[in-house]
Amino acid sequence: MLLVDDRPLAKVIKKRKWCSFTPCVVVSIRGETYFRRLDEWHDSTLLVWVETTLAKGGTGAIELTPASMSYLERISKPMLLLFLNITKARLGGDTPDAQALSAVNKVSQDKVLSERFTFTYTDGIAYGDRMAALGLISGVLPSMAFNTKVSTHSLPAST
């Protein structure tokens, strides 16, 4: 028996008739609910799905923060990084920051691209000092950088 105190989640469970989907994993992030049947997933792919869903926070692109950094390092894929004013982007509307975040979220949902690249965004005001290391010297927001994350195993040996 499952006791659910969260009203929005309880409504989703009732509406979706979860009993027909058991066993399953349910992830709820800021009012958005995601679910996957356990009998359709191997342990490793289920773990990747849960980590990715939690890291994306329901948006598509992953917010690069100190908390998500270790997850992003483990993915070890080339990363498209959008620096923006998070406050303006979250307000939405017709601002360049909101448009850029929306575009990156949309592109990140393409299955072929998301298998090859990680799409991320970060607060360009709080982490603006990191922009120069990626070649963004103007300080203008929003700005994008591409980090190829070359593995040391693929580099030629020095003589």
Image (cartoon, rainbow, N blue to C red):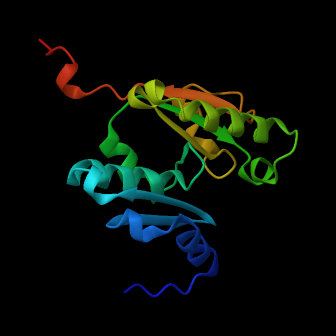
Q: Nearer the viewer, residue 133 or 110?
A: 110
What residue is at 22 percent from the left and 50 percent from the top? Answer: 42
Q: Nearer the viewer, residue 31 or 105?
A: 31
Taking 94 as reference, is 124 left or right?
left
What residue is at 46 percent from the left and 30 percent from the top? Answer: 111
Whether 99 is drawn above or below 21: the answer is above
Whether 68 is drawn above or below 25: the answer is above
**Percent from the top left, x then y, of residue 14?**
56, 74
Quadrant of the image occupied by residue 31? bottom right
Quadrant of the image occupied by residue 135? top right
**Percent from the top left, x then y, of residue 82?**
62, 36
Whether 98 is drawn above or below 35: the answer is above
Whether 34 is drawn above or below 64: the answer is below
- Give the number of callouts: 0
The N terminus appears in which quarter of the rendering?
Answer: bottom left
Q: Nearer the viewer, residue 96 or 111?
A: 111
What residue is at 32 percent from the left and 49 percent from the top? Answer: 48
What residue is at 42 percent from the left and 50 percent from the top? Answer: 52
Taking 53 as reference, is 29 left or right?
right
The C terminus appears in which quarter of the rendering?
Answer: top left
Taking 139 as reference, is 33 left or right?
left
**Percent from the top left, x then y, of residue 66?**
47, 57
**Percent from the top left, x then y, of residue 96?**
81, 35
Query: Residue lying furthest right in this view?
Result: 94
